[in-house]
Amino acid sequence: QISNLTADNFIGFAAGTYSANATATINLIGTSQGSQSGLTAGKKHYVQGDGSLSTTADSPSVYAGIATSSSNIIVKG
């Protein structure tokens, strides 16, 4: 899988599922995003190269935010 993810270009999460070329709403820094799963509440999470989230940083290290529950994250909070 090819990824253009860098430590500087992650700005948030899509607010839903969108088809190609559709206009999307993005939850930006400081907003709450509640459609995640498998998060660890109270822990920092990082975007992995495949787009998933983990409590362990990948390379590059891309901070996603802190989980408030197993399904909710505060973007870069």
Image (tube, rainbow, N blue to C red):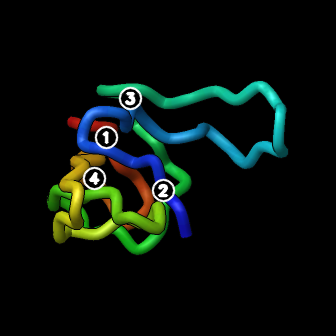
Residue 68 marker: 4
Q: CA distance from mark 1 to mark 3?
A: 6 Å
Q: Quadrant of the N terminus?
A: bottom right
- Mark 1 and mark 3 lie on one chain; the one further toward the N terminus is 3
- Dot 3 falls on a residue whose secondary structure is loop
Mark 1 near mark 4, Cβ–Cβ under 8 Å? yes
- 65 horizontally vs 34: left or right: left
Q: Residue at x 49, y 41 (%)?
A: 13
- Mark 4 and mark 3 lie on one chain; the one further toward the N terminus is 3
- Mark 4 and mark 2 lie on one chain; the one further toward the N terminus is 2
- Mark 2 and mark 3 lie on one chain; the one further toward the N terminus is 2
Quickly name the residue at label 3.
31
Residue 3 marker: 2
1 or 2: mark nearer the eye: 2
- Dot 1 falls on a residue whose secondary structure is strand
User: Does residue 38 lie above or below 4 as drawn?
Assistant: below
Dot 2 crowding, Cα within 10 Å, few <14, some 14–19, many 20+: few
Q: CA distance from mark 4 to mark 2?
A: 27 Å
Please, which residue is most extreme toward the front here? Answer: 2
Q: CA distance from mark 1 to mark 2?
A: 23 Å
2 or 3: mark nearer the eye: 2
User: Does residue 66 lie above or below 52 as drawn?
Assistant: above
Q: CA distance from mark 4 to mark 3?
A: 12 Å
Mark 1 near mark 3, Cβ–Cβ under 8 Å? yes
Q: Residue at x 22, y 63 (%)?
A: 59
Quickly name the residue at label 1.
74
- Dot 4 falls on a residue whose secondary structure is loop
Inspect the image, locate mark 4, and give the three-letter code of the amino acid beneath it. Thr
